[in-house]
């Protein structure tokens, strides 16, 4: 791998937003380098959408077998081999990390440098102590699970959504602190795999009260206990974790999972040295054009939130479609609605977001997109299809 000392754009991070920005810049002929301090691919493919939806699908399969209403089609569900399930999940994550991140970076002609990025001034970035200068920098480092300051939490072996999906054995019981979307999916995931689950917190706290009430009914119907209060203290007794709420209610479980939001992953970047301001929580402050307080640096928010994941479409295919659209967001605005409408009507995409042109040559990359590489997802398998290069359909 070539060490780049000066490029047009440095992208810090390799998640969906970072890859989208890097690809767009390459399509405009800019030289690009992405920097990754951890695992290639960011949140979605490694610890977010892909693993959680895979495990949710498995849990749903077991739940469907147990709640089968058709006596003429008998079904059953035995004990869960979580180790085998996690291995299957990891295989999928590894395959997608290679084909949708590493291969895509190579196809579009930009390198990914491993290392920790730190600003030394407004125009200089060090990667593991070595300078990398650019005309523009884009901060797309994502976020990680927030750990609340609950007395006693640090004295127990708590889980987050990340570590929970790495378990190889199911706990007998689980207390989930937090009723947001991450807490909801983790609670239902483990409950449907056979774990006794209690959720502490209002379900869907940012949604309408009527929706929260319906979710509560659905959870109770599946045997998930709900305590609509805030966790106040955590203690451990005889191998079990006890969570006490502000109103004095107790929930006890073998493990406790914290799902109380996300916190920015900006520590270590030394943003003040670059003139980049953050808010009280550490999130980068940006204007309407996503520019930071230093106009040389930009902050890339996750584009995927712009699309509703739950429109009655096939979820595995929808995830792939959203990722794929984000990778080609130069065409995003004008085609997304048409694609989603086609998918709803016919069950498969009728239009394809294929770049109008291959990337212009870069001084740091001799090859652009290979002639055989077409990133159209297929309705049959929801993965990448390698076909002949085609122009954008009219």
Image (tube, grey):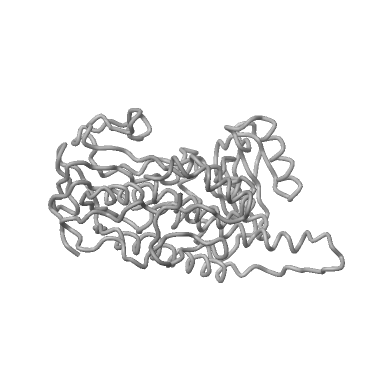
Q: Quadrant of residue 372?
A: bottom left
The correct choice, above or below, for 207 with respect to 325 in the image is: above
Instruction: Please name whichever residue, 78 or 248, is drawn nearer the observer in this view of the structure.
Output: 78
Residue drawn at the location 83% of the way across and 59% of the way down? 69
In the image: residue 332, left or right of residue 359: right
**Residue 114 in view in this figure:** no
Furthest residue in direction front, as rendered: 394
In the image: residue 251, left or right of residue 115: right
Residue drawn at the location 48% of the way across and 66% of the way down? 90
- Residue 351: horizontal and vertical position, in percent? 50, 52
In the image: residue 158, left or right of residue 263: right
Instruction: Please name whichever residue, 380 or 261, is drawn nearer the observer in this view of the structure.
Output: 380
- Residue 1: horizontal and vertical position, in percent? 20, 65
- Residue 94: horizontal and vertical position, in percent? 43, 66
In the image: residue 25, left or right of residue 321: left
- Residue 155: horizontal and vertical position, in percent? 47, 48
Q: Quadrant of residue 280?
A: top left
The correct choice, above or below, for 279 with respect to 159 in the image is: above
């Amino acid at each position: 791998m070539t060490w780049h000392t000066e490029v047009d754009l440095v992208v810090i991070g390799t998640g969906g937003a970072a890859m989208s920005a890097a690809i767009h810049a390459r399509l405009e002929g800019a030289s690009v380098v992405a920097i990754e301090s951890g695992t290639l691919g960011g949140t979605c493919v490694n610890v977010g959408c892909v693993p959680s939806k895979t495990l949710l699908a498995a849990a749903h399969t077991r739940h469907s077998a147990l709640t089968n209403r058709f006596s003429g089609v008998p079904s059953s569900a035995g004990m869960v081999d979580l180790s085998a399930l996690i291995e299957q999940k990891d295989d999928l994550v590894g395959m997608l990390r290679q084909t949708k991140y590493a291969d895509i970076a190579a196809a579009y002609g930009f390198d990914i440098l491993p290392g920790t990025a730190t600003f030394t001034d407004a125009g200089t970035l060090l990667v593991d102590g070595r300078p990398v200068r650019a005309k523009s920098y884009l901060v797309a480092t994502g976020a990680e699970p927030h750990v609340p300051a609950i007395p006693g939490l640090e004295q127990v072996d708590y889980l987050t959504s990340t570590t929970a999906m790495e378990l190889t054995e199911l706990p007998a019981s689980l207390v989930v602190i937090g009723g947001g979307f991450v807490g909801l999916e983790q609670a239902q995931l483990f409950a449907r795999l056979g774990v006794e689950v209690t959720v502490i917190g209002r379900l869907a706290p940012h949604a309408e009260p009527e929706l929260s009430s319906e979710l509560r009914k659905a959870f109770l119907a599946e045997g998930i206990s709900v305590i609509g209060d805030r966790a106040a203290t955590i203690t451990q007794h005889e191998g079990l974790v006890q969570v006490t709420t502000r109103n004095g209610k107790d929930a006890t479980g073998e493990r406790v999972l914290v799902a109380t939001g996300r916190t920015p992953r900006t520590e270590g970047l030394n943003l003040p040295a670059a003139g980049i301001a953050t808010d009280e929580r550490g999130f980068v402050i940006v204007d309407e054009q996503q520019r930071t307080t230093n106009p040389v640096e930009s902050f890339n928010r996750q584009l995927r939130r712009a699309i509703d994941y739950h429109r009655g479409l096939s979820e595995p295919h929808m995830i792939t479609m959203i990722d794929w659209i984000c990778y080609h967001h130069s065409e995003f605005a004008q085609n997304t609605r048409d694609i989603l409408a086609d998918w709803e009507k016919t069950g498969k995409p009728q239009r394809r977001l294929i770049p109008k042109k291959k990337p212009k040559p870069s001084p740091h990359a001799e090859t652009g997109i290979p002639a055989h590489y077409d990133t159209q997802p297929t309705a049959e398998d929801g993965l990448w299809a390698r076909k002949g290069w085609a122009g954008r359909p009219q």
